Amino acid sequence: MVSLGGSIDTDRIEAAVRELLSAIGEDVDRPGLADTPHRVGQAYAEFFSGLAVDPLTHLQEPVGVAGVVSSPSTLGEVVLVRDIDFRSICEHHLLPFLGVAHVAYMPGEKIVGLGDIAKVVDTLASRPQLQERLTEEVTDALQTGLVPEGVLVVMDAVHGCVSSRGVRHTRSSTVTLASRGTLSDPVRRAEVMAMIGSKGDY
Ligand code: ZN
């Protein structure tokens, strides 16, 4: 089920979509468009459901403490969660951008479940966004919620406003990066970037 968020008024979205369809010269009463305002209202409620959620709530239940993690995606003390799918909406055009997030952190006291990190990404992505700001906000949420020694977030996404408008660069993606603490160090950062880029075994 879709969480409708605290203040999303789907009736107003539906009215706005009817207005938008009229504005492009469509017959809003033709059968094919009959349910469109309702569908768009539901879709928008989902796209922006993160506005009503504090991402830090996903980081309140630690699953362990530093030093007890042993997973194939750790290198030294770094925990890396790769290829978290996300969908966001560009606030300049209200068109989707879709991609993957890679999140690395060097734990301090707290370790959370991998799904919790994905929830932080999903919550912050489910708002009107810019990829650069989204990357910074995910990084800040992890820094605040986990108090790690370092954190690094890389996001790689294809933007609907780039692939479907203007010159239509359908395959170009945008990569953004933000880091804090020890993972801002160029050497540590390069190590993590190599881990993210490597798709094979360790
Ligand atoms: Zn855009």
Image (spheres, helix red, strand yellow):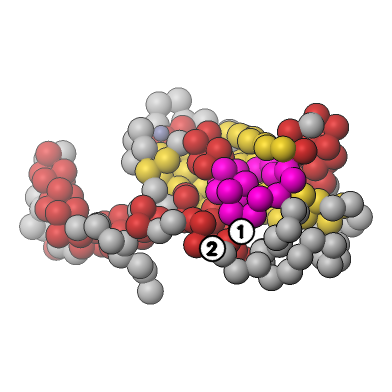
Q: Which corner quadrant holds the N terminus?
A: bottom left
Q: Residues within 10 Å of mark 1 (few under 14, many from 20)?
A: many
Residue 198 in picture, x, y percent from top left: 83, 47
Look at the image and say whether residue 149 sits in the magenta stretch.
yes
Q: Is residue 3 above or below residue 161?
A: below
First-in-chain label (2 vs 1): 2
Q: Is the residue indicated by label 1 positioned so its CB lies within 8 Å of ligand 1?
A: no
Nearest the eye: 195 or 53: 53
Which residues fall within the magenta stretch?
Answer: 138-153
Q: Which residue is mark 1?
A: 117
Identity of the residue drawn at 79% across and 31% down: 185
Identity of the residue drawn at 35% across and 33% down: 92
Nearest the eye: 14 or 149: 149
Name the kind of residue labelled 2 in the image: His
Residue 125 in picture, x, y percent from top left: 47, 49
Residue 63 in picture, x, y percent from top left: 69, 70
In what quadrant does ligand 1 lie?
A: top left
Q: Is residue 121 above or below residue 139?
A: below
Q: Which residue is mark 2?
A: 58
Numbered badge on residue 100: none
Residue 178 in picture, x, y percent from top left: 63, 36
Q: Residues within 10 Å of mark 2 (few under 14, many from 20)?
A: many
Q: Which corner quadrant holds the C terminus?
A: bottom right
Q: What SS does tag 2 mark?
A: helix
Q: What SS does tag 1 mark?
A: helix
Q: Is residue 19 above or below residue 85?
A: above
Nearest the eye: 171 or 80: 80
Name the kind of residue labelled 1 in the image: Ile
On the question of residue 47 being in view, the answer is: no
Look at the image and say whether residue 164 sits in the magenta stretch.
no
Q: Is the residue indicated by label 2 positioned so its CB lies within 8 Å of ligand 1?
A: no
Q: For the residues marked 2 and 1, what is the alpha-carbon distance in whole angstroms?
A: 8 Å
